[in-house]
Amino acid sequence: MLLQFLINALSLGSFYALVALGFSLIFGVTRAFNLAHGELVLLSGYLGYALSKYLHVPFLLTLPICMLCLLFVALLLHRLLRRVQEPIELNTLVITFGLALVLQNCMLLFFSANYRLIPCTGAPFELSWAQCTVTRTQAMLIALSLLATALVYILLWKTFLGKALRATIQDPEAARLAGIHVGRMSLIAFGIGGMLIGLAGPLYGRTAYLHPFGGTEATLIAIIITIFAGAGRVRSILLGGWLLGSVESLAIFTLGASWRDLVSGVLLIVLLLLTPEGWLPRQAKPSR
Amino acid sequence: MMKRKPDLSPVLMLVLLVLFLVWPLFAKEAVLYFRVMGMACFYGALAFSWNLYALTGAISLGHAAFFGLGAYGSVLANHYWHISPYLSILLGGLMGAVYGFFWNITFRNLRGARFALATLASVEIPKVIIDNWDTFTFGSLGLVGIPPLPSLELGGAVLAFGKSLRAQYYFLFLFMLLIGCIHKRAITSRWGWAIRSIREDEVAAATLGVDVAGTRFQALMLSAFLTGLCGGLYVHLLGLVEPALVFSLHLSALPLVLSIFGGRYQFYGPLLGALILYPVDQFFFHSWVPVGHAALYGLVVIAALLFFPRGIGAWVQQRMKYAWN
């Protein structure tokens, strides 16, 4: 029973970490608040759904296709947000809020308001010695999320490009002075973020029902974990994802599934109140 | 050139006012136009209410919370106590103000993007509670058959606000005018100057003796109360209510989009946005793409922030100035 709960929380939490990773990378490097993050995840999910339903593409093949498509979408978003004037955070927030509205209505137009699920094939793994089951979706969720997280971790902490990215997250001005091409860094951040979103989408479509207005929740989750962990801190993001996954599983278990949104809403408000100085590492001047 | 402008604008306002009051008398059977222009006025009022707080520099993404609480406050008071919709709408406004009070306590130290995020999250709290409290609020199914605004008898004349769409248009127009006057005072009065100084620089404003916390508190309470009123009015116009309808992202976004598009710093800006965008949405966009027509508002706010962040009104004014000089 406990083990089953832990497996559920682990798979949900790993997925949350995957969703948050893209958001936090983009936010950290470019200071752009992408409120359309959840909608982009949904878009990728719908793309995966369409591919598997109409073109009968096998699920594992939809992942790279979605990643490639969302990479381009993210680069377009980068071009859009590059033109935003000061104050960056607030203006990107409002612009991506508008973008979220556009995406919601486009998805409503093309996929209607019905709930969609990417069908799952194959029997679940029965762990008879522990009396619990791991569905194929859960196994895939855990494996792919951990793989993606590990890759991003290696990129950020073991390569020279990662060093430059981290420097930009810490202080864009100082990074520029040190000779780092900040514009290129934000392009790379959007690229990686887009691929992470593309990966998360079809996985979302398999674990939860796709609905055009369901994106806000994913955005809130990404923001919560980013605030909890700090931008671009991969290990903390994974931890935050697991914690949030456990808290939400617990809330669903004790209160019922309909109270889940309340948990994420209250958590976000509490986290915002607890971190009044901002959540970027060592900010030069406190944001007002 | 600059001297003559203040002399002209009251005349222009008066002409527009008369135009708005008179056109329904000549259009006899234009029911659709009454409906759409009435709702445009309604959304103008909503945008005014939102902008009251946005004038202090705080962009809220969560006014749907006030709207929804106002809607449910009015509907439930009407359902359980059978009081007149006019009273219950006021009660709905008070519900909004109560939640505004909570905002004021909890979000006191949040500014900018952090405040916006907190407001976005705070919509979920009343929404989920109302969604789950089946015995009292009828849960996610909501209520149907909410009574329309009852007719009033004023010196022999019957004002059927619920039945005649023309009377409803006048009602909504006057409602908008009332909130518009409050909004104008929030820009031009001494209190408005205090608000503006807070927006520009809080520390400097406090140094000059402006009561920063108090002014923000007043603006938020007023904004929350008026948004609650709009919510209460909305459900009596529509006749049904459900959590997903009145606590929607769309209703949080709409006043923001209208205000930013029309111009957040002019007293007429939010109304201008509503009068342009809502009819365009209903007459053209809605017939073109019936399902996803609200995408227009998203596109508009993106374009507005990129190309004319001070609003279409200021943008046109600037262009005119260039054209004349």
Image (spheres, coloured by chain):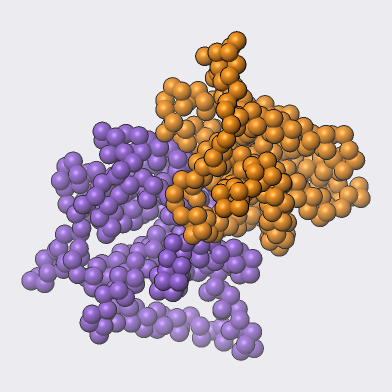
Chain colours: A orange, B purple
Q: Where is residue B139? Give x, y as percent.
A: 31, 38
Q: Where is residue B291? Give x, y as percent.
A: 44, 62
Regarding residue A167, the answer to whether it shows in the image is no
Q: Residue at x 37, y 80 (%)?
A: B16
Q: Is residue B26 left or right of residue B264?
A: left
Q: Quadrant of residue B24?
A: bottom left
Q: Residue at x 72, y 46 (%)?
A: A64
Q: Residue at x 54, y 84 (%)?
A: B3
The C terminus of chain B - image quarter: bottom right
B178 or B191: nearer the viewer: B178
B184 or A48: nearer the viewer: A48
Q: Is residue A136 left or right of residue A177?
A: left
Q: How many marks?
A: 0
Residue at the outermost left position: B156
Q: Where is residue B128? Give x, y as percent.
A: 40, 37
Residue at the outermost top position: A129
Seen in the picture, residue A84 relative to B132 is either above or below; the reply is below
Q: Quadrant of residue A3?
A: top right
A81 or B224: nearer the viewer: A81
Q: Residue at x 12, y 69 (%)?
A: B158
Q: Is residue B259 left or right of residue A276?
A: left
Regarding residue A160, the answer to whether it shows in the image is yes
Q: Where is residue A144? Give x, y as percent.
A: 70, 34
Residue at the outermost bottom position: B324
A274 or A101: nearer the viewer: A101
The N terminus of chain B - image quarter: bottom right
